[in-house]
Image (tube, helix red, strand yellow):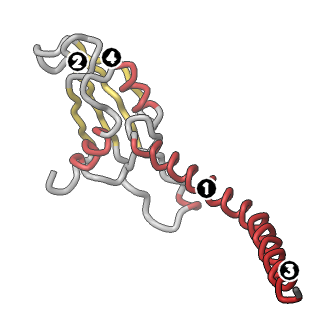
């Protein structure tokens, strides 16, 4: 009988240990699940770059800028949405005369790099200001057909 009594004690101790371990691990598991869910949601929201607020990089080539802007301005996007996307990144947009007869309307969006601080507040020579020009073209006056990107001064070799 003594032997049976030890077995019951051991089983009781095992159940008590399992209960304690379960109570200790449950908050840890909940924390890990919530972290992985939040990370997954963040990754999914970052996948749609057309609505992201990735800042425009002033220091890049025209080709690189066209690629970056191409993530925000997609074919058949409305002109209004394209203007909002560029406006959120520091561009000012206004209607312009279409450069070609094949477009019904065009919108010119401009962005200039910030002015350099005054001489007494800087250590180096001022950077050359860069002006960016994005032209949104539309065949029907409502949707973006294509866009062009230019800058002054032109990049070396550009």
Quick one: label 2 or label 4, which is nearer the N terminus? Answer: 4
Q: Secondary structure at mark 2?
A: strand
Distance, label 4 to label 3, CA atoms, is: 85 Å
Task: Name the image quarter holding residue 84.
Answer: top left
- The tag on residue 1 is none
Q: Residue furthest bottom?
A: 3
- The tag on residue 138 is 2
Name the residue beneath numbered marker 3. 9
In this rendering, the label closer to the viewer, 1 or 4? 1
Q: Secondary structure at mark 1?
A: helix
Q: Is residue 46 left or right of residue 136?
A: right
Circle 2/circle 3 CB separation < 8 Å = no
Residue 121 placed where, x, y %? 58, 60
Q: Is residue 70 left or right of residue 10?
A: left
Question: How many C-alpha atoms fall within 10 Å of the one at disc 4: few (<14), some, or many (≥20)?
Answer: few
- The tag on residue 95 is 4
* Location of residue 117 with respect to 52 vertically, above or below: below
Residue 5 placed where, x, y %? 87, 82
Q: Residue sitting at 31 percent across and 32 percent down?
A: 73
Quick one: label 1 or label 2, which is nearer the N terminus? Answer: 1
| Pick the front one: 130 or 79 | 79
In this rendering, the label closer to the viewer, 1 or 2? 1
Q: Residue furthest left?
A: 101
Question: How many C-alpha atoms fall within 10 Å of the one at disc 3: few (<14), some, or many (≥20)?
Answer: few
Quick one: label 4 or label 3, which is nearer the N terminus? Answer: 3
Q: Residue sitting at 79 percent across and 71 percent down?
A: 15
Task: Name the image quarter holding residue 138.
Answer: top left
Residue 9 placed where, x, y %? 85, 80
Name the residue beneath numbered marker 1. 33
Task: Name the image quarter holding residue 80.
Answer: top left
Circle 1/circle 4 CB separation < 8 Å = no
Q: Residue sitting at 56 percent across and 50 percent down?
A: 37
């Amino acid at each position: 009988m003594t032997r049976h009594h030890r077995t019951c004690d051991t089983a009781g101790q095992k159940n008590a240990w399992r209960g304690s371990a379960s109570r200790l691990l449950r908050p840890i598991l909940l924390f890990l699940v919530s972290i992985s869910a939040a990370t997954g949601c963040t990754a999914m929201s970052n996948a749609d770059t057309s609505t992201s607020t990735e800042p425009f990089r002033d220091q890049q080539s025209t080709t690189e800028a066209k690629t970056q802007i191409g993530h925000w301005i997609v074919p058949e996007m409305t002109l209004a949405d394209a203007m909002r996307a560029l406006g959120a990144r520091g561009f000012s947009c206004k209607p312009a005369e279409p450069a070609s007869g094949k477009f019904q309307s065009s919108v010119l969006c401009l962005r200039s790099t910030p002015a350099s601080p005054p001489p007494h507040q800087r250590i180096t020579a001022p950077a050359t200001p860069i002006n960016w020009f994005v032209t949104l073209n539309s065949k029907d006056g409502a949707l973006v057909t294509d866009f062009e990107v230019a800058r002054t001064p032109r990049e070396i070799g550009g």
